Amino acid sequence: MLLKRVFMKPDRWKVFRKQTFIEMDNLCIDSLGIVAIISVFMGAVLVIQTAYNIDSPWVPLYTIGFTTRQSLVLEFCPTIVSLILAGKVGSRISSEIGTMRVTEQIDALEIMGINSPNYLILPKITACVLINPFLIIISIFLGLIGGWFVAMFTGEVTTHVYLLGIQSFFVPFEIFYALIKTAAFAFIITSVSGYHGYITKGGALEVGQSSTKAVVYSSILIILANLVLTQILLG
Amino acid sequence: MIEAKNISKVFGDRHVLKDVSIQFDKGKTNLIIGESGSGKTVLMKCLVGLLEVDKGQILYDKRNFSEMQLFERKAIRQEIGMLFQGGALFDSLNVEENVMFPLNMFSNMSLEEKLDRVNVCLKRVNIINSNKLFPSEISGGMKKRVAIARAIAMKPQYLFCDEPNSGLDPKTSILIDNLINEITHEYNITTVINTHDMNSVIEIGDKIAFIYKGQLWWEGTSLDILHSQNEELNNFVYATELLRKLKG
């Protein structure tokens, strides 16, 4: 029911566009810092762990770069970063809308004749579904850079071999798979969090509970969607 | 004019409103009074469509609001202004943007025209040089006044106020009361105020409806209320020892 109201035609396209750009800044660009930190360290750890697991001299060293890229593209960047964003963005959306609900700001929108779920939730869904895939591309890039730094400083693998590894057996569809997953996860995060915020009743305590529910349900749904999408796209 | 005809509202097994029929006149300050939990807030929420009535009809100038579809209600809602208990100003917008909000959503005015209208409304509620302040930076009384300015920005036909004096000192309460009363008469609006502030009742109540246990118990003017023989109404009006002594 709520999603039906969310996806109705906006009251004013100009206002919708403006809100979407504001949300792109608040929800996506604002998350760039945490995504960058996580990605660099994720890539770095992946290189160390892969190098640690290569015991046999028969396994070529470029496997380190290859494994790091595959792990980042297929799972770590789209899924782990989305789970982190479920915590950061999901709690923000839920608490923002929940506070608007308990302080009667949503009632004020309704009284004015504004479709409040559409006005509040649709720009957030649009912003995240459009921008999060770009965040994930940045995340993959930074993850590979992080891995390269560690490879260079620890001497596990030379730059040349690492670069050879990350270019080996590249299948462009895997990037498409990562972006599709990210867009789906972005939809889950924003819609689930928007819903929990919107149905909040009570006061500060309930706003907190809604935030927690938003993060928990988003995370569970992301994990389930990850399995389903992987089976559909790669199975 | 707003009419409620035989409206009832039930929550679970609790009959919050029981067959209430009431009429709110145009150009008058209509007050709904009653104890906490008597059903007056539910009545107001039903009137504005935030809650659906289980039985009965709500008519805005003979237009049956309760039987309208969502898109039909939208047109009437643009004729409604509402002042919420806490102001319900949008936290992320400053004073000017809050008042301009309904204009951005529903008018085709240019930016200059919208700014002019915003300044007229803010001046009307005696707020000057505060356009760029955010709700968190202004006092409770100012929030209420900005909320009134936002409510009148679209030149509404109907104004609803939910406990406009709650949380305000007596002096600011009188100021807000007078402001609502002046605006009502100036723009010939149908105003409905939900209150339990007896000062408001005496000062600005053109028409008063007393809700008791979900029923319309008494109707009259601010003069009638002082001489009423209705026991439940008197228990409510003269709730304090001081007032009982004054009544004699």
Image (cartoon, coloured by chain):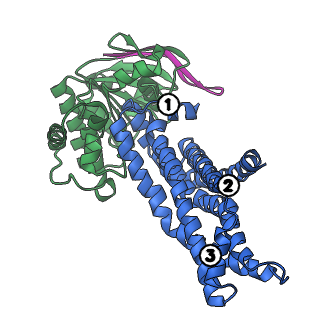
Chain colours: A blue, B green
In the rendered image, residue A203, in percent from the top left (x then y), is placed at 53, 50
Q: Where is residue A214 in the image (x, y as percent from the top left)?
A: 62, 51
Task: Indicate the position of residue A30 as horizontal and vertical percent values.
Answer: 45, 62
In the image, is residue A207 above or below residue B52? below
Q: Which residue is drawn at 66% across and 89% down?
A: A154
- Please provide the residue range marked out in magenta: B1-23
Whether discs 2 and 1 lie on one chain: the answer is no
The residue carrying mark 1 is B38
Q: Which chain carries label 2?
A: A
Name which quarter of the figure residue A150 lies in: bottom right
Q: In this view, does B59 lie above or below A187?
A: above
Mark 3 surroundings within 10 Å by alpha-carbon count, few (fewer than 14), some (14 through 19), many (20 or more):
some
Q: Which of marks 3 and 2 is nearer the N terminus?
A: 3
Magenta region, mostly helix, strand or loop? strand
Mark 3, mark 1: which one is toward the viewer?
Answer: 3
Farthest-out residue, top? B62
Name the mark on residue A219. 2
Query: What chain is tagged by disc 1?
Result: B
The amino acid type of the residue labelled 3 equals Leu
For disc 3, the chain is: A
Left or right, B194 with reference to A117: left
Quadrant assignment for the N terminus of chain A: top right
Residue B21 shown in magenta: yes
**Residue ID for mark 3:** A163
Is the residue at mark 3 from the same chain as the one at mark 1? no
Label 2 sits on what residue type?
Answer: Ser
